[in-house]
Image (cartoon, grey):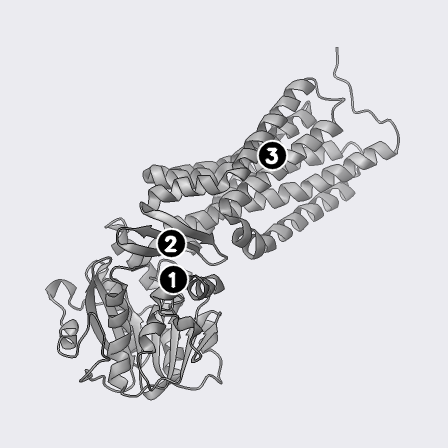
Amino acid sequence: MTAPAAAPASSSTPRATDVALLASVFVIAACGLLYELAAGALASYLLGDSVLQFSTIIGTYLFAMGVGSWLSRYFERQLPAHFLRIELLVALVGGALPAILFIVNAHVPGAFRVLLYTLVLLVGTLVGLEIPLVMRILKRNVRLQELVSQVLTFDYLGALAVSLAFPLLLVPQLGLVRTGFLFGFMNAAVAVWALWLFRHELRQFRAHALACAAVLAALAAGLLGAEQLTRFAEDKFYQDRIIFSQATPYQRIVLTQGRQGLRLYLNGNLQFAESDEYRYHEALVHPAMAAHGGPRRVAVLGGGDGMAVREILRYPSVQSVTLVELDPAMTRLFADNPQLARLNGGALHDARVQVVNQDAFQWLQQPDLGHFDVIVVDFPDPTNFAIGKLYTDSFYALLRQHLAASGHAVVQTTSPLVARQSFWTVVTTIEAAGLQAVPYHAHVPSFGEWGYVIASQRPWRAPRELPAGLRFLDAATLPLLLDFPRDMARVPAPVNRLSNQALVHSYEQEWGRVGH
């Protein structure tokens, strides 16, 4: 007995089927690219070096798609049934990919990298099978020339739609885990649509229907429980109780509450702890501010938590502070959340403070900014090339253009003990930009020995007095911060340029040794 052929009941039936399949191509392309972007974003969050992670993820995914396309030649009969099964597999594996990776990173971190590329290979292979099967099904009723153009058009349109929605809408509003399950659900919906379209051709209709129902139920459960799954993963990773988490287009923000108070993490890296943040921020701000004498115009680059601004506003001479923070979610959080606004003393609501949500590199390229008496540079550590560009000689050359002749800039500069070459790379790079560099360090218990560099066009001199009410610094002990013992003393280091990003490479190597 032979299997029944596709029923050409009327001239309108094939056309309706073709339209439905082309619409499926749009969804398939959108879902496939979404899984690829989610894997790349997760790898960047958890492994650092976004350029490396996205390059290797994309390369692996495209290779796997090629393997899938090649394997499609072995599917000769019952094409709709094969297409339906592949859709369900893609929906299940791709939709659960972000949740699986988050949980594995928290509970079995050593297996994360292997599982990441295994899942990317699997999903890529399955996605590579989809389009050839759709084209062969459509080939029954559509001429080859029209077939290729139509399929590719819908494929590219789907990819365009999700590439725009992923950073602008999906991640900020839904988060990675919920977004993964949502698109998995969409893939499964395509399988259900195929189940209905080809119900007359499927030999085991009941089994396929049950498989569709099971996958839809699993994805729906994941979608509804996405928040609980994320907390399950992050509570283990961060140890302290998570009180806030948000994925923005730029980073993942997590706040925890524990015995030592609040802690802020960006992409898994600790930014401050409430118990000792005063040490970090007093050391960052006051050596430059107090040395100036009477700073009026001040800029803070990074530092969206407002802690550095809080210290700057201790000086009565300050007339304006421009805070340049890329991520508006950060400045909103630390301005509007009462618990966090208490930490920065409500600094972001001060009338003298202007918040600019823009990339600091681009902001400094504006010719009409004028000059600043003090510029505080409080960026995250250079874990990837996007941040590493903010530690290059090109960036410091722009900084110099907007620094008053008698002004000082100060740069937070990782640990001179753990990342010794990275620290002195920043010093060398500042000097290469034509600025005088004064390196110093302070002990911050949450970080250990932490480094800073004052950059100026004229020699820096230690101030004779500091503002009243400081908990860590005073004028008598400040000069001690300039003393570097032998294990932190200067070593030869290259200039960090946009063309080489030497700092990112040394930072990854040095912090990687201690499992940072």
Alpha-carbon neighbours of circle 3 within 10 Å: few (<14), some, or many (≥20)? many
* Viewer-side label of 1, 2: 1
Q: Secondary structure at mark 2?
A: strand
In this view, the residue farthest toward the left is 486
Q: Secondary structure at mark 3?
A: helix
Query: Of callouts 1 and 3, which one flags the residue occurring earlier in the amino acid sequence?
Result: 3
Q: Is residue 292 visible?
A: yes
Q: Find residue 255 and name its label.
A: 2
Who's the residue at 58% across and 41% down the image?
182
When asked about the image quadrant of residue 276, the answer is bottom left
Work out whether 506 lies above or below 39.
below
Identity, as a three-letter code, of the amino acid under mark 3: Leu
Q: Position of residue 428 (x, y in %)?
A: 26, 72
Identity, as a three-letter code, of the amino acid under mark 1: Leu
Which residue bears the numbered disc 3? 129
Q: Is residue 117 visible?
A: no
Q: Position of residue 410 (x, y in %)?
A: 30, 75
Identity, as a three-letter code, of the amino acid under mark 2: Leu
Q: Secondary structure at mark 1?
A: helix
Would you say 97 lies left or right of 311 here?
A: right
Q: Find residue 340 and name its label.
A: 1
